[in-house]
Every structure is written in structure tokens, then in C-alpha cells.
Image (tube, rainbow, N blue to C red):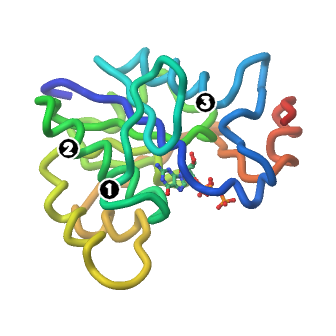
Amino acid sequence: MAGRLLGAVLAGGQSRRFGSDKALAVLDGRTLLDQAVARLAGWCEAVVVIGRDAGPVPVVADWPRAGMGPLGGIAGALRHARDRGFAAVLTMGVDSLGLPDDLPARLGEGPAYVADQPVVALWPVAVLGALEAILLAEGRHAVRDLITASGARAVALEGPSANVNTPEDLARLGGGS
Ligand SMILES: Nc1nc2c(ncn2[C@@H]2O[C@H](COP(=O)(O)OP(=O)(O)OP(=O)(O)O)[C@@H](O)[C@H]2O)c(=O)[nH]1
């Protein structure tokens, strides 16, 4: 990736299927939120958390407001990145597990996303205009809309990457809430 890379943990949302705040669920002795921040810190010049308070890690708000789903978090992250001279944002969820160490190399210059976990993605700041237009249009907004608008490339990962939607998903991985 040419240029500075900002890491952004998407950490808003309702955790409806999980039944309690999944960012604070524990796996291998650490919360999912802490693990996501640490993962991105290994890849990026700086890390922010989008959509919730996260202790010492800088928090950035969704754009244009909370409650629009992951796409609103991506927009908040990209605006923060643009204003601070970053070239791109690497996003992941609090619940994005099993990502390979060479993820940024696989995503390349972006825009690109992990095929079965589209919240894991590399978005150049240049996609911000298209994203803002999507979010300001009427109706529901999904990450798929940004993938289509930007022509983002799907990156298939071999091996068991997984995300945690329910307590059963976490229990399978050996964790608890
Ligand atoms: N910043 C931000 N992050 C979000 C938002 N909605 C979901 N996320 C994050 O995006 C990732 C994937 O979220 P989902 O599991 O699809 O949604 P969720 O609301 O957390 O859970 P459900 O209520 O069960 O759908 C998680 O890390 C969430 O924390 C949002 O509106 N804003």
C-alpha cells in the first residue's frame, strides 16, 4: 500500500443476534474489541475505533449519523483519514477473526474486500465521494453498495476466517460473553 494506512475497527451496531455487546465478549482472555485494535495496530500507522467509546484508543463517530450500519462507520473512518492525510483505511469488525498476517498485501492498493467478510476491506480515501452519495440517498444502505460503486475487488481467503454473530459462534471458538 503506497501512502499512510489508518486502521479502523467498526464497533457500533446492535449485537442483536449476540444478545449483549459483542465488542466486550472475551476470547482467549481478551475482549474482541481489544483483539481487533491490536490486529490493526500491527498493520497500520494509527488505529481508531468507530462508533463506540474504547478507552485509550481514539474514537471517531459514524457519518452522517449513528444507526446507518457499517457503511456509516466506514464513512466516518474515511473522513477522519482524509482530514489527516492518510491514503486509505483498513476496516474490520470487532468480530472479524482468523485474518491472515499478510492481509494488507492481499488487499493491495484497494479498493478490495474479503469475500466472505465484506466489513474487512481496504478503502482508498478516493472512494469517499461515492460513499457519501450512497449514504445521502434515500433507502437502506449496505456495504455491497460501496463495493459495486467503487468496483472493489473480492479477495478470497483460504482457511478458516470467521465472524462472530451469535454466542454459539463464540463458544465454537472457545470464548464466552
Ligand atoms: N461504526 C459502526 N459499526 C457498526 C454498525 N453496525 C454494525 N457495526 C459493526 O460492524 C461489524 C459487523 O456488524 P454486524 O454483526 O453485521 O451487526 P451488529 O449490529 O453488530 O449485529 P446484529 O445486530 O446481530 O446484526 C461489527 O463489528 C459491528 O460492531 C454501525 O452502525 N456503525
Q: x, y percentage for residue 163?
A: 66, 45
Check whether the beta carbons of the residues at disc 2 and disc 1 lie within 8 A of each other. no
Q: Residue furthest bottom?
A: 138
User: Label for residue 63?
Assistant: 1
Mark 3 or mark 1, which is nearer the start of the sequence? 3
Q: x, y percentage for residue 139?
A: 39, 84
Q: Quadrant of residue 83?
A: top left
Q: Nearer the viewer, mark 2 or mark 3?
A: 3
Badge 3 element: helix
Residue assigned mark 3: 33
Q: Please report the residue visible at 28 percent of the width from the left and 17 percent of the height from the top.
A: 45
User: Label for residue 124?
Assistant: 2
Amino acid bearing label 3: Leu
Q: Please report the residue visible at 49 percent of the width from the left and 63 percent of the height from the top.
A: 67
Q: Is residue 38 above or below residue 115?
A: above
Badge 2 element: strand
Distance from the alpha carbon under mark 2 to that under mark 3: 24 Å
Amino acid bearing label 2: Pro
Q: Quadrant of residue 138?
A: bottom left
Which of these two is toward me, 106 or 62?
62
Q: Please report the residue visible at 59 percent of the width from the left and 38 percent of the height from the top.
A: 94
Which of these two is toward me, 162 or 48?
48
Please indicate whether residue 100 sits to the left or right of residue 160 in the image.
Answer: left
Where's the C terminus, which quadrant?
top right
Q: Residues within 10 Å of mark 3 (few under 14, many from 20)?
A: many
Q: Please report the residue visible at 81 percent of the width from the left and 54 percent of the height from the top.
A: 19
Where's the N terminus, which quadrant?
top left
Badge 1 element: loop
Amino acid bearing label 1: Trp
